[in-house]
Amino acid sequence: MVKIHVDMSLCEFHGQCVFIAPKEFRFEGDDLVYSEEVDEEHRARVERAAKACPQLAIKVE
Amino acid sequence: MTEISLLSEAARACPYHTYRQLRTEDPVRFMPDQNIWVLSRYEDCDYVLSNPTRFTSRESLSSANAYRNCPAALETLAKSRALPRQRTLILADGEAHQRHRKAIQNALSPARMLREFGPSIEGRVNQFIDAFIGKGHCEAISQYAIPLPMALVATIFDAPEEMIPTLKGWSDNFFAALSGHVPESVVIQAAEDTLAFESFILDRVAARRGGDGTDFLSRLTNGVDGAEALNDAEIVNICSQILVGGNESTISLLGNLIYQLATQDGLEAALRADPDKIPAAVEECLRFEPPLQAMYRITLQDEVIGGKEIPAGSKLMLNFGSANRDEKFYRDGEHFDLERDNTETLHLTFGRGRHACVGQTIARREAVIAVTALLDRLENIRLVPGDPPGRAGIFGVRGFARLPIAFDQRQ
């Protein structure tokens, strides 16, 4: 499994992750909601979303 | 080693050939004339941006501090109502920077901004187009690219529309003085404008202090929704960054996009056929022509970058214009390619990490709205024979001062 953690003290809601990996990240109102665990097959997409985060707030394990 | 200058006339007209030369021949190069290290590879720029504790942002905006060398400007600035001056946001590090960032995040939340102002921006762009569409031609910078972000900046400061030319004049002078390489008279004028701007902001701050308003200045002044209140000096300094950052680079982005539409065969048709590609065109234009070609950092300790030993206290120029075309990350990066997947390697135009552009989401949205409206109402957008575009003259800026275009009105 791929573990996702977003440091919400850094997140500024630029939404690049939502754009790149909409299945794992989405906005609900003004909040960012994300899957904490996803299948290994989605790793590449999730890592790309983490790399795209302007604030480097997303950690993927 | 080969002579390479970023200040030559050719490099200032089009820097990308010089960048390629730097990237391939000497990607971490010391320029003795400017006493600066130029980093031209993606990896090296990314490394510096991602390590804010090793590289300070205290002079992130310019290769030179114009005010410091101008006694008359310093004398004017000493009359400020908001002393001591404070380095904020883009010019601050560590905890102070994070405090400012939090306050801005609250006051300028992209989600709220787009919800509150999105529809009015869409209305405004159509008014700007109404003003010139009947003529079949326009000067795209003054009639379209400037009015859009300036309307938004005025809204943020709750300034009346009549103030827009004044705000823009201040912004232009601040920006010119920041960039360095300008006559002393410009620096002196910018110092005087700093005091005028300060009064404009502090009068508004005073009117809001202790109130229950939720607009941008109220949020900075009183701290709304759990955000910390900032002091006068911090607010003034942040607001000058919002003023300049909120219009200057967006104007360049819009001009660069319109230039691509006017000069690139098939782009207009491709986007009209599939408007969902407009965000991709905006992203590719951001990569291809970063409005701000570079940002700056100073080393806090001795560093080795790209095999070069760089002593503590050295100024680094992060050459985004070059990094965004780095062969290692971008295939055929010297070409504008609508089909490029820019999520594979995110361009550095907005920076990365702690200091990444705080207005990037709003800027992207403004650009998409602006292009959508143009494509909706104009077609066959083209340059005007005999009236060529004029480049912005400020070092490090990639954009246009004038961009005359002609078009047909869509039926």
Image (spheres, coloured by chain):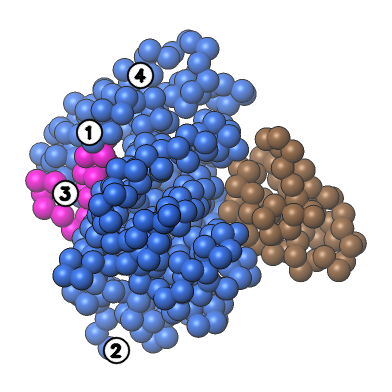
Chain colours: A brown, B blue
Left or right of B177: which side holds B242? right
Ranked by sequence position, the earlier of labels 3 and 4 is 3
Residue under pointer 1: B166
C-alpha distance separating marks 2 and 1: 47 Å
Same chain for mark 4 and mark 1? The answer is: yes
Instruction: Report the residue marked by disc 3.
Output: B69
Query: Which amino acid, mark 2?
Result: Met
State the image coordinates of residue B364 (x, y, percent, origin top left). 50, 51
Chain on which label 1 sits:
B
Say which element carries label 2.
loop
Residue located 58% across and 34% down the image? B115
Q: Which residues are magenta?
A: B167-186
Question: Do labels 1 and 3 touch, CB within 8 Å?
Answer: no
The answer to whether mark 4 and mark 1 are in CB contact below 8 A is: no
Between disc 3 and disc 4, the foreground one is 4
Which residue is denoted by mark 2 in the rendering?
Answer: B1
Separation of marks 2 and 4 at Cα, in angstroms: 55 Å
First-in-chain label (2 vs 3): 2
Q: CA distance from mark 3 to mark 4?
A: 32 Å
Q: Which is more toward the observer, A10 or B114?
A: B114
Indicate whether residue B265 is drawn in magenta: no
